[in-house]
Amino acid sequence: MTPYKIFKLVFILLIFGIQNLCAQDITGFVIDEEHKPLEFVSVALLQPKDSLLVKYTSTDLEGKYEISGVKSGTYLFQVYLMTYEAQQRVLVVENKHLKLDTIKLNREVNTLNEVVISAVIPIKIKQDTVSFNTKAFKVRQDDNVGELIKKLPGIEIEANGTVIAQGEEVTKILVDGKEFFTNDPTIALQNLSADAIESVEIIDENSDDSRVSGVKDGEQSKVINLVLKPGKKFGYFGKAGAGYGTNDRYATNLDLNSFTSKTQVAVFGKLNNINNTGASVFNRDGTKSSSANGFLTTGTAGANFNYELKPDYNFNVDYYYGYTDNKQGSRSNRTEFSNQGSFDSKLTNVSKEVSNNHNVNFSLRDRSKKGAYLLLRGRFKSDDRIGDGANKTTYFNDDGSEDTSSDRLVNSEDEKNDGDLRFSYRRKLSEKGRNIRGSSGITFNNSNNQNYQQSLNEYNLSTPEDYRKSNEIITRDNKNNTFKYNWSVRYTEPIINNHYLNITSDVKNEVRTLDLVQTKIVNDEEKPGFDHIQDYKREQYENTLGYLFSKNKMQVSLSVIHDIKKQYLDIDGFSILTKNYTNILPKATLSYEVKKGKRVRFYYAKSIITPNVGQLSPIINDFNPLRVSFGNPSLTPSEAHHINARFFSHSFKSANSFFIYLKYNKTNNAIVSKRYFGENRVRYSTFENYGANSNLSGNINFSRKISKLNIRYAVRMNGKMYDRTTIISEEYNVIKSKTTGGGLSFSNINKNIVDVTVGGKIKYTNSTYSLQDTENNYVEQNYYTKFDYDISNSINFNSQFNYSLYSDSNFDSQAVPIWNAAVEYVFMKGKRANLKLQVIDILNKNIGVFIRSTPDYYEETFRKNLGTYAMLSFNYNLKPPSGKNSKRHNKA
């Protein structure tokens, strides 16, 4: 996108707000019955005809409020603070500044006579909770919860479905305070209808220890609670839909929910071939997939049941099934490093993987007894996968001629079963903070992986006299069985007021067994294979003496851990290693709440990182004949130091937010990769202890509204730098990498009819490599616009344009413009039905571009994607909304 086009988009935003330049301000004060100023009082202007929100603010420490950019007209003026009687009246604003008389709020005495609140304030604070009212954000009839929370300030959803709120990862999503599909927040995000949600609460949840003992320990986690609309809390509601489009694209969906005062029952299902999963998609190695590239057909179905036996005593069980058929096609260009310089290679790949998985989770939580908390959790997953692929890798000489090539056909069949069972009990022994905690757990993981590969490898392609080839067939079967168990006991004793000592003992043990069989045939001649049984055991024993100071807004925690780790590795009955390590590990945290909405936290810890079994095992993996790897039993643990600091501030008067996060890690005696190249580009890799690695990262987020222009802008800056070393043919390659970036976006505040967003992001990465005496510079730019317009009460038009530009000093620049558009029509009684026509990737330019720089190489990859398609879809609400419709459909 050219600077001229960006200027035009910003100019459009200014046009929406320019009419407010001559608008008026409203100021005043709010006090209580004792004439003391009241802070955090919500002050709002509403439209008289439909009670839609126009402007809002909250009072400061002195009880003062100011609403800026108010156009002349008649409004409902509303003042509200929890536990006080609300006040509301008609207010006429003319072309002059309006200073209102001081408002006195009285304590609630009779809720039957209280003033009816016409609109909930968009953002409210309740102790450690920030609550967003969904009426303040445009919600379309077919939006899911994920689309809703993307519009909330300070919340982002990453490509793999992880939710980040105020810079921290959200650990769980609740519905009316109850668990919903325990281990997969993606299900709530993609299957619950946004129209059913009254408010979204972002909660800084104190630790379970803190809630039981009543003593804050400074440990918090981010939780999202979706509060249902009153009409959705009883009876059933849901949605069903289907769509069909060009290129035989299709999508179907169903969600049905039935809630009562004690039960929650939810079922969902999706089947489509438009890369919409409906639940988390996991890679073969168990990590979450972060890419929607390729051609993905998915079918998911699940059910969730929650029963409240009595208040704060809940049982939850959920099941979901997932099916994926994932077809991928890609090509890559890579520059790989050696001690004598670098060499280039090209890779083409096509693959298909079909997976079927079953997931069951349950939990029993008992908080019904004061000062006690019992928790029992269980999880089971079965995952079967069949994969086929074909790829070709070609290596080039310095003059660009082909040197080595490898054509591979691969097939894999994987069966995996894993699960765990965890129990914990906490009890408060005295009002002064004496408490005890006990916990235990077991985990199992059993897998059977069958792998087949046929490869044609050609060497010395540019020198016919030295040319040779080999045709290899390799089978490799792995049977892995892992069992882990742990238990922990902690006792806390108050010393004097606000000072506490705690003693903790932890045991964490694991046992892994690998049965590995490999056969190899080279040029029709059977070669010696191997059959190994590998037994690995790891034991960890920790005894911790801790100190906690906790008073009002400050918590200081100091602890010293006596850590013992033991590792044992046997192969075919022979001992390969037996090692014991003993260390003293300090840890310290400081948490301080400056005021409501403003917090700071510091953290330091030392840890010992033992090499894993893959880094230790000397068993050779030559399944890819050009990539041979093996472990190093001589490795010793690394010593790591972790430091992070964060500061968060949100002004409830101006709705301005500021967040900064810094993290520094340093690892001594680091475990680094060690590589060398043999004949014909065969790479051998292992590990070795060497030197220190370090990394420093941070980000700053800032959001502010300009009321006079009806615009909110958000600024985000981030950076990361790291130093690490790899060993290439006994020479040390020091890699230094620096990444800086940022983003700026503008959006209009009043979104009742038009919702416009325009913004851009940029990321710059510079990497240097000492052995190559070279550097890699990579710039990624992204510019985007979103336009949403209610043409009438029933018709909506929306469009999104995204322009990405990738520039790399070693590769050609790539531009990817993506333009989507849709028109929607809502009809039938209660706006039950939605008809939507959408066109995806109008310009047919959607290619997956992925550029990365690692200690061993830099690479660009292009992946095939769906391309242009149009789809007509129909969605039907199985039960019409109760009470007031959502803001979007409240205009009839």
Image: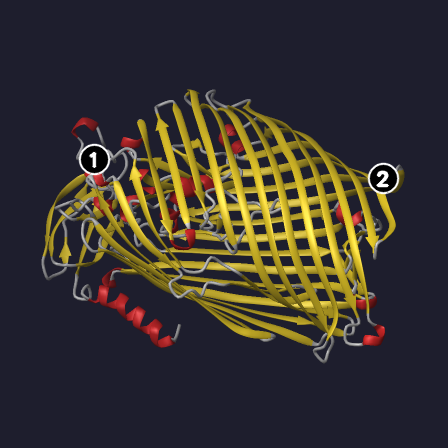
Q: CA distance from mark 2 to mark 1?
A: 73 Å
Element marked by disc 2: strand
Element marked by disc 1: loop
Q: Quadrant of the C terminus?
A: top left
On the image, the x and y values in percent for residue 267 come to 42, 32
- Classify mark 1: residues with Cα within 10 Å, few (<14), some (14-19) or many (20+): many
Q: Amino acid at mark 1?
A: Glu
On the image, the x and y values in percent for residue 686 come to 79, 56
Query: How is this picture coloured?
Result: secondary structure
Q: Which mark is residue 85?
A: 1
Q: Which residue is mark 2?
A: 570
Q: Which mark is residue 176?
A: none
How many numbered marks does the figure carry? 2
Q: Residue at x 36, y 43 (%)?
A: 242
On the image, the x and y values in percent for residue 155 come to 42, 50
The quadrant in which residue 238 appears is: top left
